């Protein structure tokens, strides 16, 4: 029946094979038991754990970014807020093998620069492991048209992995104005991320950790109050498939309803002590290319205005800035990234003479009413020091010497005091150490004593140095903020800690924290000493021999009484003078003198202290004092305006001279074009100042 | 291929009627049971793909069942004569695949002949089974005291030739199955202990030296198996996601159509190689034990048929088919649960795919053929 003959008789095999099949059946049973055991392990023993992992798998948490807190001025004018804007991101895991193509597509749609392309490519190829699930930014802050283009191209299947996410960007409404104080924001760095998150964990105050790509406050108040401004992100949980696509409809029910959405909590607002009307005025009036204008409430130590120039635009720093632009800022010889008010120190020049005066009076070196004859120069040993006025001031007392800024008078005091005693009083008045201003990075300046000279100066201390120190040259260095505090102390008798944040509010306007004035100490000098120094400061502005006589206040009255200002000019040498005085135009910008003016008003009961530093601009009397005088004047005008408003009366006074009404669009005062040399730029500044 | 065996003159009406009197109905029942669960499961697995693939699976199964019944009409001993011819034909097809095959997903596995798309590697399992069964049948009586190495050269070559061709495609999974089937049949023929030790040593040493020559993705799979969580998003993704699916099914499962891993496409190849994880996720430990019990019952019944076959050819044929079913099931479920490296092996009657269904049902056809003719002379 069958073609192939059976080699063995049918059935004989069964005897041979049956036991064998039993063995094999048992072996198969064993194998299946192994599988059952494994299933028991996975499903019963570790089932709970795998169930959780399966749930995590499809739940994608989307962050709902919190609104960052605002910064307001004392009249609640909005200075810094956030504006809605969009970033384009790419998630490497979801674009998979097409990432490079999609990046090219995005490049065309968004006209990415080579730099942005390179950065995106680096991020794309550096992503490993879980990193591949994290979206990275391809382009920040896209334009409205670009948003439309992207949305139009987002047909299913195209541009997978690319997302447009709402990412509110910081809006510094007045551009470079006040920007050193505000700071800026940019992406958190990898190392910083780790450190910051550890701190957050330690603090345990409900703050969420940062993620790569998050923005964080840099410098200024943004950085100082980062944890208050930041707010707490909310989250939305959505169901996604393995490709990360969100699934709506009935699949949403996989997540319990109460776990789908957690609203974000906005950050707290900073109410600053600045009066932005005064700030605007000062920004426009101040002619300097570089320098500071600081105004402080003499009765509290709170700042009213803080002009600090030059400064890069924080809107740019916080968003789309190219490497080249950043490099240009770094290489700018004017160093726009420097917060001059607290991060740079200068010779105080003649403004230091108040310190020498106090030291001389307190140490008894100068008797009240004591005089010095000024022939135009002062000689110690074989060296001759020149006075500011070559012809000499004649016989001068303290009031006249301070008012007319006679150098010889102070050479004489310096000669008699020696450096150590000047340094002692300088230190007592707060020089040589930080003022405690709330924003970080403050330097301490230098108030050198003899030991300091021995250590730092080749050849060690020599007595002649005390003459230079006495007029604020030599190695004395102060920051503008220290000067402000010093003159504030003379004005009020109190050494204030300068502050700028008055109050922190929650988003509804309720106060979270109030900042009272902080008195660091009382001015540690006798009343007679202070009276004599104040007389000198009044003379400087109000006596015809005074260096700032032309800047005295006119036409400003309170209750019919004219207001007077007290102050001191300073012209700080930057390089050693040659035999012959040169005009400003004859030396290069960086060799020109710094102009100082420190003032307060009313002289009898000071309310406002103003300090002006105009870098490399020449004389204090002509390049710093006018700004201070104008700011003081503006302060009293505003005060009057506010009082009238409070009383419900319309503005009745004469029209306000140069302070024009604030415009909505922030003007761009600085920085000057980058292709100019510093000298050209300085020359421009000079012209504007003239 | 096997089609020429379906000629109407093959077999006599009288013996045919008698043969079906002893049809192993329990095997048919088990096959239908597993196949039904398979279709039901596929209907759930394909929900996310929005494709009613279970319908085409049913039609493949219909075709396979018809083929299996058709095979039953022909006395299996008639296949002995064609065994070598069929084997040679399959080898030729495998070579043809190598030269002219269609490349799908980086592997050359498919051959297009006219309107038919053919995966010759599936046929290779049957061909090796038939060829080895014939060789051991003809060889009977010569080796009363078991086989030594030298005497096994021919069956080893019969196994290795197609296995290597398939490995070259590359299709590690099917090559392994061919090897496993061949090895099972050879071991069943009783091999001397000494020979076993020698072969074991040679295989171990060979694997050691062959490892560097594996394709990178194959190497990766081995490494991943040793440490599946080491590369969760890369090579370990399949293994990890599959274990999550299985484990999250817990005791009673999430219910038909409720598996989130399945629904949201976290499972790779969820219709084919990883179909068991769909089942495990939705029906839990209880469902898995039920399915394992069905497979075990099928294997045990098949072994019963092997033990009761009326001649050596029948024994070996049944053992070969059983080996194929067993190794497919064991390797696949082991892979899904993470105790075997990830290799492309389907789960008989559960995985979607025409080639797999047809090959399995052809095997079942041969098996029932042996079973129903255990008394026929």
Image: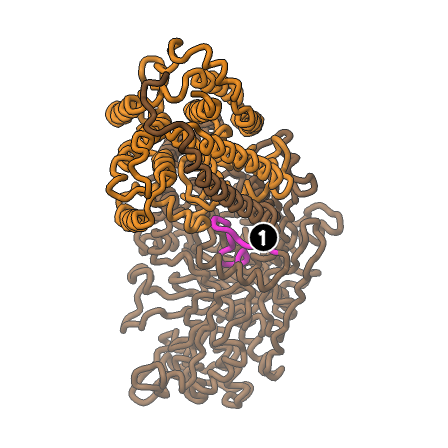
Q: Magenta segment range?
A: A207-223
Q: In which quarter of the image is the N terminus of chain A?
A: top left
Residue A530 is situated, as x and y percent measured from the top left of the image, at 59, 79
Q: Quadrant of residue B172?
A: top left
Q: Chain for mark 1?
A: A
User: Nearest the camera: B176 or B40?
Assistant: B176
Q: Residue at image x 55%, y 28%?
A: B30
Q: What element carries label 1?
A: loop
Q: Chain A is drawn in which colour?
A: brown
Q: Is residue A598 magenta?
A: no
Examine the rendered structure and indicate whether residue A154 appears above or below residue A686: above
Q: Position of residue A591 (x, y in %)?
A: 32, 65
Above or below for B256 versus B218: above
Quadrant position of residue B144: top left
Tell whether position A211 is magenta: yes
Chain seen in orange: B
Instruction: Please state the horizontal and vertical placement of residue B266, each as a whole percent of the image.
Output: 51, 37
Name the residue beneath numbered marker 1: A230
Residue positioned 50% across, 79% down in the render: A355
């Amino acid at each position: 029946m069958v073609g192939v003959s059976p080699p063995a008789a049918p059935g004989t095999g069964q005897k041979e094979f049956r036991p064998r099949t039993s063995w094999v059946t048992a072996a198969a049973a064993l194998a299946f038991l192994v599988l059952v055991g494994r299933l028991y392990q996975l499903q019963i023993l570790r089932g709970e754990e795998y169930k959780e992992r399966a749930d995590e798998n499809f739940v994608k948490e989307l962050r709902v970014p919190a609104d960052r807190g605002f910064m307001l001025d004392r009249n609640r004018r909005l200075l810094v807020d956030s504006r809605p804007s969009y970033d384009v991101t790419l998630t490497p895991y979801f674009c998979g093998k097409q990432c490079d193509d999609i990046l090219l597509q995005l490049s065309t749609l968004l006209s990415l620069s080579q730099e942005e392309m390179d950065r995106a490519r680096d991020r794309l190829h550096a992503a490993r492991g879980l990193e591949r699930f994290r979206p990275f930014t391809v382009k920040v802050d896209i334009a409205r048209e670009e948003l439309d283009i992207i949305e139009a191209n987002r047909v299913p299947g195209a541009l997978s992995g690319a997302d447009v996410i709402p990412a509110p960007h910081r809006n510094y409404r007045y551009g470079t104005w006040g920007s050193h104080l505000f700071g800026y924001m940019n992406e958190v760095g990898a190392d910083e991320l780790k450190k910051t998150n550890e701190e957050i964990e330690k603090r345990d105050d409900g703050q969420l950790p940062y993620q790569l790509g998050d923005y964080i406050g840099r410098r200024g108040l943004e950085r100082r109050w980062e944890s208050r401004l930041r707010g707490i992100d909310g989250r939305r949980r959505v169901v996604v498939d393995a490709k990360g696509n969100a699934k709506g409809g009935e699949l949403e029910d996989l997540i319990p309803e109460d776990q789908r959405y957690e609203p974000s909590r906005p950050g707290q607002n900073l109410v600053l002590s600045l009066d932005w009307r005064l700030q605007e005025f000062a920004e426009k009036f101040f002619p300097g290319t570089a320098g500071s204008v600081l105004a402080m409430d003499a009765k509290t130590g709170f700042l009213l205005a803080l002009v600090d120039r030059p400064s890069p635009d924080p809107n740019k720093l916080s968003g789309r800035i190219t490497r080249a632009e950043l490099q240009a800022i770094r290489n700018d010889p004017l160093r726009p990234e420097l917060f001059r008010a607290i991060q740079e120190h200068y010779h105080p020049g003649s403004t230091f003479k108040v310190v020498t005066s106090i030291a001389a009076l307190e140490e008894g070196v100068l008797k009240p009413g004591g005089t010095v004859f000024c022939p135009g120069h002062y000689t110690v040993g074989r060296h001759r020091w020149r006075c500011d006025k070559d012809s000499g001031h004649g016989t001068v007392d303290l009031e006249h010497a301070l008012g007319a800024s006679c150098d010889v008078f102070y050479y004489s005091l310096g000669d008699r005091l020696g450096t150590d005693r000047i340094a002692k009083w300088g230190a007592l008045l707060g020089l040589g150490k930080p003022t405690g201003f709330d924003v970080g990075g403050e330097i301490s300046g230098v108030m050198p004593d003899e030991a300091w000279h021995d250590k730092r100066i080749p050849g060690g201390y020599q007595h002649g140095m005390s003459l230079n120190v006495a007029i604020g040259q030599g190695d004395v260095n102060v920051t503008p903020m220290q000067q402000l505090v010093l003159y504030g102390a003379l004005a009020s008798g109190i050494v204030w800690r300068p502050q700028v944040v008055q109050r922190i509010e929650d988003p509804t306007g309720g106060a979270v924290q109030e900042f009272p004035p902080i008195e660091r100490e009382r001015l540690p000098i006798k009343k007679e000493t202070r009276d004599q120094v104040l007389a000198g400061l009044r003379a400087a502005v109000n006596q015809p021999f005074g260096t700032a006589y032309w800047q005295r206040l006119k036409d400003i009255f309170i209750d019919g009484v004219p207001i007077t200002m007290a102050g001191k000019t300073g012209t700080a040498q930057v390089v050693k003078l040659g035999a012959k005085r040169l005009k400003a135009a004859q030396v290069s910008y960086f060799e020109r003198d710094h102009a100082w003016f420190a003032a307060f008003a009313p002289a009898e009961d000071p309310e406002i202290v103003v300090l002006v530093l105009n870098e490399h601009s020449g004389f204090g009397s002509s390049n710093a004092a006018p700004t201070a005088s104008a700011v003081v004047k503006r302060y009293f005008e505003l005060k009057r305006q506010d009082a009238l408003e409070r009383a419900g009366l319309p503005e009745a006074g004469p029209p306000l001279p140069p302070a024009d009404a604030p415009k909505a669009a922030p003007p761009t005062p600085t920085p000057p074009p980058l292709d100019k040399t510093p000298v050209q730029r300085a020359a421009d500044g000079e012209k504007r100042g003239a | 291929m096997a089609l020429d065996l379906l000629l109407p003159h093959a077999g006599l009406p009288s013996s045919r009627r008698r043969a079906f009197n002893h049809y192993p109905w329990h095997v048919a029942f088990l096959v239908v049971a597993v196949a039904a669960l398979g279709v039901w499961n596929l209907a759930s697995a394909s929900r996310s793909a929005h494709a009613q693939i279970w319908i085409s699976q049913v039609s493949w199964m219909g075709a396979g069942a018809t083929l299996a019944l058709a095979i039953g009409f022909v006395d299996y001993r008639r296949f002995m004569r064609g065994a070598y011819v069929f084997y040679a034909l399959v080898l030729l097809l495998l070579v043809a695949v190598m030269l002219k095959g269609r490349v799908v997903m980086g592997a050359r596995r498919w051959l297009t002949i006219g309107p038919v798309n053919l995966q010759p590697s599936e046929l290779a399992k049957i061909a090796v089974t038939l060829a080895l069964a014939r060789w051991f049948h003809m060889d009977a009586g010569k080796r009363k005291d078991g086989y030594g190495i030298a005497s096994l050269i021919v069956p080893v070559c019969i196994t290795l030739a197609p296995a290597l061709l398939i490995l070259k495609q590359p299709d590690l999974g099917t090559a392994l199955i061919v090897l496993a089937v061949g090895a099972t049949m050879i071991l069943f023929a009783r091999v001397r202990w000494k020979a076993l030790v020698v072969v074991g040593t040679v295989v171990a040493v060979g694997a050691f030296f062959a490892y560097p020559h594996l394709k990178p993705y194959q190497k990766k799979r081995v490494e991943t198996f040793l440490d599946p969580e080491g590369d969760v998003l890369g090579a370990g993704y399949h293994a990890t996601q599959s274990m999550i699916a299985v484990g999250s099914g817990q005791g009673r499962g999430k219910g038909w159509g409720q598996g989130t891993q399945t629904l949201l496409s976290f499972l790779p190849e969820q219709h084919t190689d990883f179909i068991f994880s769909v089942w495990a996720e939705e029906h839990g430990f209880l469902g898995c034990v039920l399915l394992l019990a069905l497979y075990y019952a099928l294997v045990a019944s098949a072994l019963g048929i092997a033990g009761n076959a009326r001649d050596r050819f029948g024994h070996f044929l049944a053992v070969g088919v059983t080996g194929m079913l067993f190794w497919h099931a064991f390797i696949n479920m082991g892979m899904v649960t993470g105790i075997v490296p990830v290799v492309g092996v389907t789960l008989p009657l559960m995985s979607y795919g025409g080639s797999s269904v047809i090959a399995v049902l052809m095997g079942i056809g041969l098996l029932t053929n042996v079973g129903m003719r255990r008394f026929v002379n």
